[in-house]
Image (cartoon, rainbow, N blue to C red):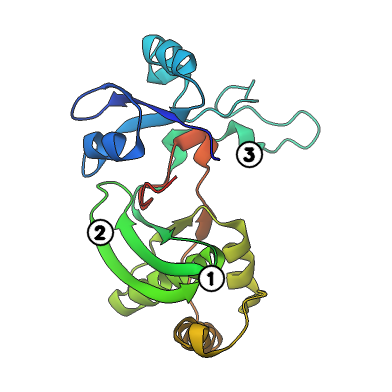
Amino acid sequence: MAKKKHYVVWVGRKPGIYSSWAECQAQTNHFDQAKFKSFESWEQAEKAYREGWQHHWGKGKAQKTTKGQADKKTGTRRPSDVTSDEIDYNSISVDVGTRGNPGPVEYQGVDTRTGEVIFSYGPISKGTNNLGEFLAIVHALAYLKKIGSNKTVYTDSRNAMKWIEKKAVSTTLKRDESTAEIWELIDRAHHWLHHHTYENKVLKWETKKWGEIKADYGRK
């Protein structure tokens, strides 16, 4: 059983501590520059709320450096140095909602700044979380290509990012009558990737630092 999370909303419609993602989302969706984060215990959430977003928003558990600090050996910034100020809000965030894995799959793409839903698809009768993430990214890239936009695409799936780079999925989901729908979509996505180019960045949404991705369905 997944651990119950507690959500701190520092900046939102009604700042406070919430015990469900749905309650948190109600305070932050479509709220410009909302600041919120999940914690494993109520005590951690209370402490974080008192300390304020400046101490927690955009910071991972292991972060000990300040913004812009370089690695002493390489002179480059480590991933843990990245702060929420560096989130590209001129972007689309995508995520998947599933009921079982494999099981019914749906996905959506939202405006990272406002949470406004730009596109959604599904439910697809049977698929996996990673396949849904892959389809969501390709859908976002195709949409942005169509409107001539170079916006960034955020995803919280490293597997899907690898598949986008390779232009092919790697899955144990069998092709049969029950999975025909999602495999048709995967084949179409493969075709699109092999016949189109794009300049959009596909980046990992750092959930531990920034909270749940804006497109999250809240089914934790």
What is the residue that sits farthest to the front in this orientation?
1
Look at discs 1 and 2 and give the one toward the viewer. Answer: 1
Measured Cα–Cα span from mark 1 to mark 2: 20 Å
Which residue position holds label 3? 79
Q: Which mark is residue 53?
A: none
Look at discs 3 and 2 and give the one toward the viewer. Answer: 2
Residue count near mark 2 (Cα–Cα under 10 Å), binned few <14, some 14–19, many ≥20: some
Judge from the rendering whether residue 50 lies leftward or rightward of residue 194; answer left or right: left
Which residue position holds label 1? 131
| Mark 1 / mark 2, whichever is N-terminal | 2
Residue 76 horizontal/vertical position (percent): 69, 38
Q: Which mark is residue 117?
A: 2
Residue 119 horizontal/vertical position (percent): 28, 67
| Mark 3 / mark 2, whichever is N-terminal | 3
Measured Cα–Cα span from mark 3 to mark 2: 29 Å
- Considering depth in this image, is 216 or 210 the residue closer to the camera? 216
Residue count near mark 3 (Cα–Cα under 10 Å), binned few <14, some 14–19, many ≥20: few
Quadrant showing the N terminus: top right
Judged from the image, the secondary structure of the residue bearing numbered disc 1 is helix
| Mark 1 / mark 3, whichever is N-terminal | 3
The structure residue drawn at horizontal position 51% and vertical position 61%, both measured from the top left corner, is: 202
